[in-house]
Amino acid sequence: MAPVEKFNPEKMTALSFKRGRQRAGRSGRHVAIREITLEEVRRDAQEFGLVTDIYMELKSGKEASVFLALWKEYPIVLKAFRLWQSSQTRKKRGFFAPAKMEMLAAKEYDVLMAAFQAGVPVPTPIGRVGNYLTMRFIGDGFTPAPRLNEVELADPEIVLDQILSDYLKLYRDAHYTHGDLSPFNLLWWRDRAWFIDFPQAKLVNPWADMRTVVEILSADIENVIKHFRKFGIERDCDEIVSDFLKSYIPKNQVHFLEF
Ligand SMILES: Nc1ncnc2c1ncn2[C@@H]1O[C@H](COP(=O)(O)OP(=O)(O)O)[C@@H](O)[C@H]1O
Ligand SMILES: [Mg+2]
């Protein structure tokens, strides 16, 4: 069974679509979405050759579950994009949910690869099949690295500068904004903050809406400097965003502020 069909076990045919429409009165878009179990994730990920086993679940969020998995004796991370069963997900995401989950996994893989190639500290992507993605495990032994909000830093100012310069690399060299940057999506490992969790990332290309780009950069950077304000460090968010824009704007958009 293809991975995406798991979310849509009662596969639609033209006839069942029509019947569903007749039954529901208005729309034939109702589709059974159910949660996938750990056993299914394990079986799929093994079948797809992404992992040899799953060790434990690290976190289950709104859109994805993250597992500490094994490739032979080595720890790796498996991220499975999937849906919670709820009337809301049914209504909002409807019939196209499986395609969206696969798209998010592909997107996260691409961003991780671009960020890695630009020299941003991210978990190196390993593989992606359907809505599953594997990447390097950030941590020691089988203990995952803590999030930035959980650690006490000896020299927070140096860490803040490093994070901002790594984010600049992501933006200037890989042309991506993160879109969900916060101390929860930065892992503290080997004296460095590692960027994770990229499904909100956006490519800043000639077709990008630069006003939205500015909003995203501002929100991300503000989330980071807000955390460091607790240690008495003050930074001007607008100034940092303006430095980012000076370092890169798609050529056709350099005058976007004048419109
Ligand atoms: N490569 C990784 N190495 C170690 N831990 C990770 C890795 N990726 C994710 N995690 C852990 O899993 C949690 C959730 O991952 P994340 O990608 O942020 O998903 P979510 O969308 O659910 O927030 C992270 O906060 C982190 O603790
Ligand atoms: Mg996260």
Image: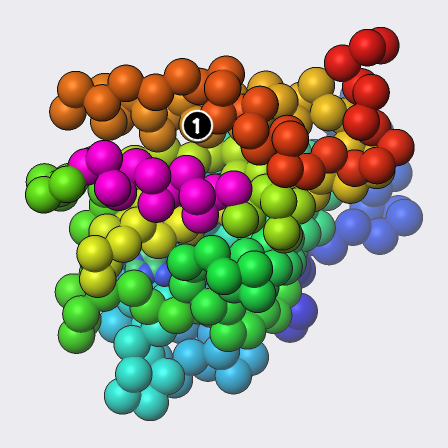
Q: Quadrant of residue 77?
A: bottom left
In the image as oriented, which residue stretches furthest toward the top? 259
Magenta-colored span = 156-168
Q: Is residue 18 left or right of residue 50?
A: right
Residue located beneath label 1 in the image: 221
Q: Position of residue 202 (x, y in %)?
A: 65, 39
Tag 1: Cα neighbours inside 10 Å, few (<14), some, or many (≥20)?
many
Q: Nearer the viewer, residue 234 or 149?
A: 234
State the scheme by which the image is colored: rainbow
Where 72 falls versus 191 (above or below)?
A: below
**Residue flagged by tag 1: what amino acid is it?**
Ile
Q: Quadrant of residue 191?
A: bottom left
Residue 187: tell me if it is visible.
Answer: yes
Is the N terminus in the top left, top right, bottom left or bottom right quadrant?
Answer: bottom right
Residue 112: tell me if it is visible.
Answer: no
Helix, strand or loop at mark 1: helix
Is the C terminus in the top left, top right, bottom left or bottom right quadrant?
Answer: top right
Where 244 falls versus 103 (above or below)?
A: above
Residue at image location 21% in from the left, 62% down from the top: 190
Residue at image location 58% in from the left, 38% down from the top: 177
Q: Is residue 50 left or right of residue 66?
A: right
Residue at image location 22% in from the left, 22% down from the top: 233
Q: Nearer the viewer, residue 253 or 182?
A: 253
Report if residue 30 lies within the magenta region: no
Residue at image location 55% in from the left, 48% down from the top: 170
Q: Position of residue 161 (x, y in %)?
A: 34, 39
Q: Is residue 89 left or right of residue 20?
A: left
